[in-house]
Image (cartoon, grey):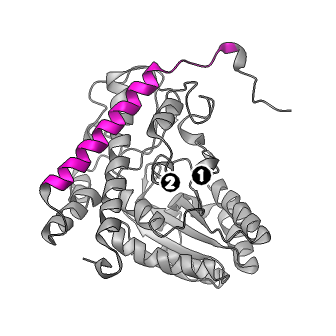
Amino acid sequence: MSNQNVLGKDQLIWIYTQMTRIREFEERVKRTFLEHPGVMRGHTHLADGAEASTVGALATRNPTDLAMPTYRCHAHPLVLGTLPRKMMAELYGRKDGLCKGFGGSMHLADPEHCFPGTSAMVGQSIAHAAGAALTAQVKNTGQIVYCFFGDGSSKQGAFFETLNMAAVWKLPIVFILENNEYQAYTHVSLEDANAQAGDPLSQKAAAFSIPGATVDGTDPLLVYGVVAKAAERARAGQGPSLIESKFYRLSAHGNAITVPPAPTQFPEHEAIGVYGNKAEYRAAKERDPIPRFRAQLLTQGIFAEKQLQSLEADARAEMDDAVQFALASPHPDPEEATNYVYA
């Protein structure tokens, strides 16, 4: 098992636990549209398939380091310690949510758990994360920032402008470009031909004279090893790195649901019919990071089946509780609509 020699048993079980919690949370979001139609409005962007990438990267952080992703952002606060109850309530638009129901899925924020917030605009989280890294540098807090964004964001002006500034100022930041094979509904093979120059995408780092690396994002331990080096460089004041983490997004780009969906829409990806390539999807499912990592842990004799079943049951119960909490939470009062609007 890659990097097994540098990670102890407690770290390995933490990684698998967090991956499982993320997947269970995302599954509850999917099921909401079937079991509780109409309660979740607006966009939700799922990241099942990205668990190894997110958790492997954040396994390298120190307790005060910040994580700043784009709008596909459910996984990161879960890993940082945000309560699933408050996250689910926010997705449901309820008063007990992280942002009192005003932010929704794309605007989660929990500063108390080192999660300053997200942006719904493609690529803007890159600039925001650099601002946080500059603050840490000026205040000499010792923090670094983990900035997550999709491959589509690497076409935005904010990407090039921010990486240039971060390199010049040697900002304490790790840029993690999560290449999930699809930019919205366009496969990476078509992007390469028509809209996206460069493969691997990590070679864009050369333009800014910073390290770049591409890693298999379905293996949390490989991700851990690559990101750990980048994090060490950032902590030492040597500036940013660009990591391309490659995996397959197992759900559609996003869902904007305002009416009950068709019964076949969830939970099976193939039934959604967004990508229309069942062979591609089945091949990707063979590389699903969670069952792969689980099999590794069992094969290596690190954990017993009963141990893994127990933590999986705990994750299911935790997320079931989050749904019940969210359903019981009240909606904001109509007169509160302008409470957080500023001119």
x and y, in percent, of residue 229 in the image? 50, 81
What is the CA distance from the residue labelled 1 to the residue labelled 2?
Answer: 8 Å
Q: Badges 1 and 2: C-beta atoms under 8 Å apart?
A: yes
Q: Which residue is drawn at 30% across and 46% down?
A: 276
Which region shows up in magenta? 306-334
Q: Is the magenta stretch mostly helix, strand or loop?
A: helix
Task: From the viewer's perspective, tell me whether residue 168 is left or right of residue 299.
Answer: right
Q: Report the residue marked by disc 2.
A: 80
Image quadrant holding the C terminus, namely top right
Q: Does the magenta stretch include residue 308?
A: yes
Q: Which residue is drawn at 46% across and 34% down?
A: 85
Q: What residue type is labelled 1?
A: Phe
Using the rendered image of the protein, determine whether residue 271 is visible from the camera's viewpoint.
yes
Image quadrant holding the N terminus, namely bottom left
Q: Report the residue marked by disc 1.
A: 115
x and y, in percent, of residue 79 in the image? 45, 54
Q: Does the magenta stretch include residue 343?
A: no
| Mark 2 crowdedness (10 Å alpha carbons): few <14, some 14-19, many ≥20 | many
